[in-house]
Amino acid sequence: MKPLSPTTTPSRAARQKGIAVMLTALMLVTTIPIVGLAIDAGLLYLIRARLSSACDAAALATARNLNLGMDLSEQIENATVRGTAFFNANFPPGYLGTASVTPTINVEQTSLNTLSVTTSATATANLYFLRVLGTSATLTGSIGRASRRDVNVMLVLDRSGSMNASNACTPMIVASKTFSDLFIQDRDRLGLVTYGGTVFNAYAPTRDFKNPSSSLNDAIDEVVCTGQTNTPHAYWSAYQQLVALNQPLALNVIVLFTDGVPNTFTARFPIRTTPDVRRDNPSKWYCGGANAYVECMIPKSSCQDDNGLPSTHPSWGVFAAKLGVLTGGSLTVVAGDTFGLLNPEATGPAGGEPMIPMPGRVGCAMTGHQRRIREDISYIPAQDVNGINISGYMESGLERFPTGHPYEGEVRPDNPSNLARVAMNLSDNVAAAARNNPTMPVVTYTVGLGTQVDHDILRRMANDPASPSFDSSRVSGLYVFAPTVDQINAAYARIASEVLRLAL
């Protein structure tokens, strides 16, 4: 037994023990509620965090599923059902003893091109330790928000002859219709441009693209694959239709499908009136008529353009090159012949590609031999018919007329490789112009099918992050490669997923 200190008496020690008991009792009165508050507050925190996650999930799911139904009210109803299912999956009934959990999902048009989804929910949470204070339950709540922009999509489909030769035309048609069905009638807008050597504006972008009497899918069904590959003019035609819509708050998208390399472009070509030499016949030039090549050292003053104007007036049309060799999916050699001059705009879905001019033009090689149009043209102009520069991506490979030639320094039209390189440059430049539009940038997605596509140009057009020329300061798209026709649907599905992700 510990001895008492000299100043501590037995009665005083007893009194100190009593005080300790009283202090402990008083501390328990305050400590227990504090501990209870901590435990109950922790449970409330868990409940509210789970409730917040459930509201966010429901809002996002509702926004993502606003494409189920024929009109907006039906779409909202179906999407709300999906959103509620996501809420219940993330906040199961009775979670941590909660009750009276009632989610409310509201969809409203907050701007011309945006639907806003708000999910709110409350839950009654039980209290355990704080019941001693007379409160057995409390109410907690949360709100989740998401928005879904309208989407304007222009499908640009390659209907060149190679699509038919490889039996890819029908699979492309089927997959394109499946892709269009993923978008929303009465809100999203879809349109269609098809192209071979010429370009056909097959279906103007509209919200009513699932109209049974005149649908986008009907227009896709009419595609007939024939001709060359005028990628730049087709892309520009689609881009101009998006510009005409003038909806900067929407997500504006071009989806370009191709199985080959751009080899065609549209321009106003100056007709040759000065005798010169050409690379394949350096001592002769073509005057037209029954004989292919004759000695002819006089200007072709009788050659008129497609409007019957004098030959000094440029001729508007399509000029193409027949391609040669592709190695490893990249352009390495372009050889073959030239083809044109064609009417730039197709007159129907079959994409007929009539010559310019019609029979009867006097003094022009193009009258009787479409593959000798290069003998009637002075040079390739510095810009195409849309004002896009022909220089750029493949500038180093362009051959120009030499010093002393009547057209010194101009890009030669009598080199098939030049035509393909110009078409590649123009394809790159039109896509850059679309994404660089400061008021309404366009996102580009490209699908390349088979072994004859050039992966580099399709990545460049999409501003794909995998492209060596990727510009992180501009909107980025995606290039998807489909090695075979069996993978076209998968390529489209990936693009649709990316588009809908960006729309949120």
Image (spheres, rainbow, N blue to C red):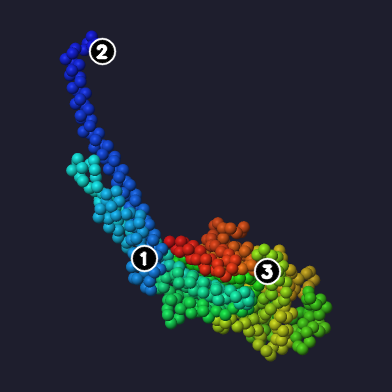
Q: Nearer the viewer, residue 385 or 23?
A: 23
Q: Nearer the viewer, residue 14 or 243?
A: 14
| Residue 273 lies in quadrant | bottom right
Please tell me which of labels 2 and 3 falls first in the chain: 2
Q: Amino acid at mark 1?
A: Ala
Question: Is residue 136 depicted above or below 25 in this figure?
Answer: below
Residue that carries the numbered disc 2 in the rendered image: 2
Q: Amino acid at mark 3?
A: Arg
Q: Position of residue 139 (x, y in %)?
A: 25, 50
Residue at the extreme bottom: 360
Residue that carries the numbered disc 1 in the rendered image: 79
Cα–Cα gap, marks 1 and 3: 48 Å
Indicate which label's residue lies in the foreground, 2 or 3. Answer: 2
Q: Position of residue 5 (x, y in %)?
A: 24, 11
Quadrant (top left/top right/bottom left/bottom right) for the N terminus: top left
Please tell me which of labels 1 and 2 falls first in the chain: 2
Quadrant (top left/top right/bottom left/bottom right) for the C terminus: bottom left
How many C-alpha atoms fall within 10 Å of the one at disc 1: few (<14), some, or many (≥20)? many
Residue at the image position 43 percent from the left and 76 percent from the top: 210
SS type, badge 2: loop
SS type, badge 3: helix
Question: Is residue 64 depicted above or below 340 in this figure?
Answer: above
Decide if residue 37 is on the left or right side of residue 462. Answer: left
Decide if residue 346 is on the left or right side of residue 325. Answer: left
Indicate which label's residue lies in the foreground, 1 or 2. Answer: 2
Residue that carries the numbered disc 3 in the rendered image: 421
Q: Pointers 1 and 3 in contact (CB under 8 A)?
A: no
Cα–Cα gap, marks 1 and 2: 79 Å
Q: Nearer the viewer, residue 409 or 432?
A: 432
Q: Is residue 262 visible?
A: yes
Cα–Cα gap, marks 2 and 3: 105 Å
